[in-house]
Image: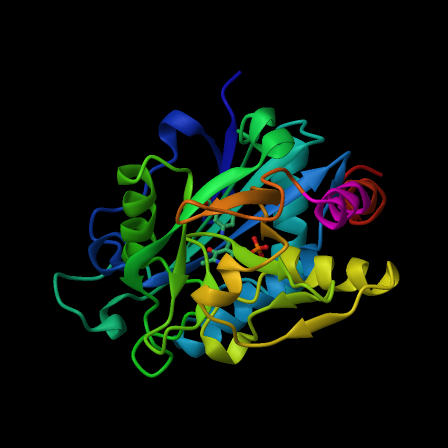
Amino acid sequence: MSIQIYIDGVFRPKEEAKVSVFDHGYLYGDGVFEGTRAYNGRIFKLQEHLERLYESARHILLDIPLSMEEMKEATLETVRRNNLHDAYIRTVVSRGAGDLGLDPRKCTRASMVIIADKISLFPQEFYDRGLEVVTAVTRQRTADTMEPRIKSLNYLNNILVKIEAAQAGVMEAIVLNTQGYVVEGSGCNIFIINKNGELITPPPYLGILEGITRNTVIEIAGQEGLTVKELPFTRHDLYISRECFLTGTAAELIPVISIDRRTVGEGIPGAVTRNLMRKFHDYVQHNGTPVYP
Ligand code: PXG
């Protein structure tokens, strides 16, 4: 049976789940989204993902037609309808159908889609062996032009970064801001471990999406007794880091073993990274909002 998509309050099979070509999400990227996961019949950090969705919507003056509580129920129901225990969930709220002008007032009602499907993961060998990455020429958009903390439907900058990675023959590229500070990947956050064994990640004010996986890793690392610092750092710090890894809903934690062809540490996933990966996997199995009674 084909997967059931939540679309504006009803469930439709994938083939019949359609939005208007006049939707400003399509015409202008005018909307917001979230990517969430379910593990073992529980939705991981559902509240945090919904808060981020509503904050993104608030910034762009987009009225989400559901309360957060209703949205939570709609999300759970979408996973249930598809009988999923491990899932990737994509929530999209766009400005809705309007006319061929920018004016959002012509869009009378936001449109809402929730897709829950099986996840396609990175091949296991990337977790075992680690990723090679490059730094991107494309810079992060600045908070005074397009705030990176809004998870908006305009991901063109991120796509350009992903294209750079592909053209360099690697899976991911690391983005710097216009000041030359490292910020994040195309769809993930970044951590390094320095020579003092401290875990360092860029602070949100530099212009990053404050990842929910990132925040979970900070929490777990604290419990593991690691010193965690949110500090600006540059490409130099990347090159001399002892360990490096990326975090995101889709990728979870993934080790980085080379950056711009400079080997990180021993060129294999480091001990701190591997321990955090293990702890993260335990954490997701036992935390989250239950989908089934
Ligand atoms: N930075 C950016 C720019 C992102 O888009 C993250 C960091 C990591 O945040 P979370 O909260 O996921 O730890 C993201 C997340 C996809 C996909 O389909 C993208 C994201 C999340 C899930 C799926 O490529 N972006």
x, y (%) of residue 134?
Answer: 39, 49
Is residue 44 on the magenta stretch? no
**Residue located at (39% from left, 35% from top):** 17
Q: Is residue 96 left or right of residue 106?
A: right
**Seen from this angle, which residue lies furthest bottom?**
144
**Seen from this angle, which residue lies furthest top?**
1
**In this figure, what is the number of numbered marks?**
0
- Quarter of the image for the C terminus: give it: top right
x, y (%) of residue 168?
Answer: 30, 40
**Residue located at (26% from left, 54% from top):** 23
Q: Main secondary structure of the magenta part?
A: helix
Quarter of the image where one finds residue 47: bottom right
Q: Which residues are magenta?
A: 270-280
x, y (%) of residue 179?
Answer: 36, 78
Is residue 271 on the magenta stretch? yes
**Residue located at (55% from left, 45% from top):** 256
Given residues 180 and 290, the one toward you in this image is 180
Given residues 55 and 196, the one toward you in this image is 196
* Relative vertical location of residue 44 with respect to residue 233 in this rendering, above or below: above
* Relative vertical location of residue 195 with respect to residue 2 in this rendering, above or below: below
Specify whether residue 28 is in view: yes
x, y (%) of residue 204?
Answer: 54, 75
Specify whether residue 9 is in view: no
Q: Is residue 86 left or right of residue 174?
A: right
User: Which color scheme does this rendered protein use?
Assistant: rainbow
**Residue located at (58% from left, 40% from top):** 267
Q: Is residue 207 left or right of residue 196?
A: left
